[in-house]
Every structure is written in C-alpha cells, then in structure tokens.
Amino acid sequence: MDIQMKRGLLDVCVLAAIKDEPSYGYKIIKDVKPFVEVSESTLYPILRRLETAGHLTVSTAEHNGRLRKYYTITPSGVKRIEAFKDEWKEIMQIYKFVAREESRSDET
C-alpha cells in the first residue's frame, strides 16, 4: 500500500479509537489491533502529528503511581473522521471501476 495512503488511514484509525472517550497509548494499540497492526514506534509519532494538527489534545493523570498521557479528540479531529468517510466514498468508486476492469480481463 502507498505509504502516504497508509499514513492517512492510520491517523483516522487513531482518531476513531479515541472518538468516544479519552485513551492512552497501549489501549489505542489494543483497540485498533483487530483492524490494523500499529506498533508503539508507529503510534507515538502519529499522536504527536495529530496533536500538532489540532485533532487531539493531551493531558496527564496518575495511574498506579505513574503519570499516563491521555489523548482526547477535538472537534477538528471529529471533522477529520467525517472528511475521511466522504473521501472513502470516492475511493470506493475508484475501486469499483478498477475491479470492474479487472473482472472483464479475467473473463477473456
């Protein structure tokens, strides 16, 4: 898969993981794992990029005697998810066109 496309998909997956409630790194990885593999070394740059873009905010809270970073989606992050859904409709139209062309060549 094209690296830029995958990067955009991972960004939206992370936003979707925190859409309903604030979350922390390990839980985000666990929540997206059934859908896409994300390592810690991939996740944390994504979180920093999303914070810089204003799509999430970061806060800290103590958990078992340690500080834990919690990530919360912003209205901008919610808008990014909605924009992705609209973009995905266009991508699916392109896929249908490409798959149609492939199925025609398979028939010959």
Image (cartoon, grey):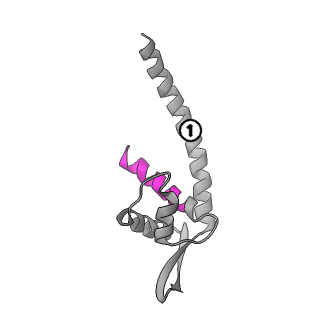
Instruction: Give x and y (percent) for residue 103.
Output: 47, 19
Give the SS element for disc 1: helix
* Residue pictured at 42% horizontal, 64% vertical: 43
Reply above or below: 55 against 66: above
67 part of magenta stretch: no
Tell me the quarter of the image containing the N terminus. top left
Q: Specify the amino acid type for callout 1.
A: Glu
Q: How many marks?
A: 1
Predominant SS along the magenta part: helix
Residue 96 x, y percent position in the rendering = 53, 29
Residue 51 on image: x %, y % = 49, 70
Point 44% across, 22% down: residue: 102
Q: Relative to residue 86, is residue 43 depicted above or below? A: below
83 or 28: which is nearer to us? 28
Q: Position of residue 11 (x, y in %)?
A: 48, 58
- The extreme top residue here reads 108
* Residue 52 shows in the view: no
Please give the name of the residue rendered at 58% of the width and 63% of the height, measured from the top-left corner. Answer: 77
Do we see residue 14 in this rendering?
yes
Q: Which image quarter is the C terminus in?
A: top left
Using the image, determine if residue 24 lies above or below residue 93: below
Between 60 and 64, the residue placed more toward the observer is 64
Residue at 62% x, 61% y is 78
Neighbours of disc 1 within 10 Å: few (<14), some (14-19), many (20+): few
Q: Is residue 2 left or right of residue 78?
A: left
What are the residue bounds of the magenta stretch?
Answer: 1-15
Farthest bottom residue in view: 65
Magenta stretch containing residue 4, yes or no? yes
Q: Mark 1 — residue?
A: 90
